[in-house]
Amino acid sequence: MGNDYLEVGSGGDRRRIAVRRREGKNPGLVWLGGYRSDMAGTKAVALDAWCREKDLACCRHDYSGHGESGGAFRDGTISRWTAESLAVFDAFTDGPQILVGSSMGGWVALLMARELKRRGEMERLHAMLLIAPAPDFTHELMWPQLSDAQKREIVEKGYLEERSQYSDEPNIYTHALFEDGEKNRVMTGPIELGCPAHIVQGMQDPDVPHEHAMKLAEHLPSDNVTMTMVKDGDHRLSRPQDIDLLLRIAGDLAGTP
């Protein structure tokens, strides 16, 4: 399956977003990856293969500065990546969809739901599957853990580099990312999704503590919210048993045996 591409933005801010879509029945699945991850990751590929077996539509893309998409990673912000995700959603999907948000993608999914509600298009949101969701991670998880020296470096230098345990390339956190994150916080009051949601969280996650997922659940007032804690699960939740769990949950949400 080859890529489609979508041009997003204008002028010097124009970037080419790589998209892979699979035709099929609805509700389809829309994959929203994490920070520095891409649509060729283990979970995304497994979900796409599962959709093929079930004849369900599937759409995944790379944010700008990620994977096969254009644009510079350093220019990335939550607003920018959410706008790209909405553009892909509008251009490549129709009918009800299940948003599958992994880590930062969970934040993007919640912001997409907010925008769909504003547009009066909540019928497009069938359900949500949030995997180790990291909404508000800049404010809730990162900034409080930074030293005064690191905070000064972000403000004065404009970014902070940290070694990544998942890649040879360092993680880069820009001042713009933190500033933009403040504007996009969702865990400041009730989050009305208007659809079922299932949160899957590893209890051995070193990046997003399971307490964060529990805090998110408290902001979801709907009774139709389920949480599955994987006692020995890490942040990736990409082991065979984790994938099996995610596919079972996706099947339940989609109503597909």
Image (tube, helix red, strand yellow):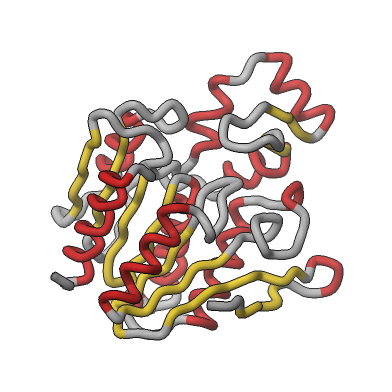
Between 78 and 93, the one lying in front of the other is: 93
Determine whether 84 is above or below 209 in the image: below
Residue at figure coordinates x 46%, y 50% from the top left: 107
Say whether residue 188 is visible: no
Left/right placement of residue 101 relative to residue 222 reads right
Between 6 and 240, the one lying in front of the other is: 240
Residue at figure coordinates x 35%, y 84% from the top left: 24
Determine whether 8 is above or below 195 in the image: below
Between 211 and 240, the one lying in front of the other is: 240
Say whether residue 194 is visible: yes
Furthest-top residue in this view = 148
Residue at figure coordinates x 28%, y 47% from the top left: 199
Instruction: Please give the count of numbered marks on the rendered protein.
Output: 0
Left/right placement of residue 132 relative to residue 70 reads left
Residue 176, image x, y percentages = 72, 43
Q: Quadrant of the C terminus?
A: bottom left
Residue 127, image x, y percentages = 27, 65
Residue at figure coordinates x 60%, y 67% from the top left: 84
Left/right placement of residue 31 relative to residue 179 reads left
Residue 97, image x, y percentages = 34, 74
Residue 44, image x, y percentages = 44, 59
Q: Quadrant of residue 217?
A: top left
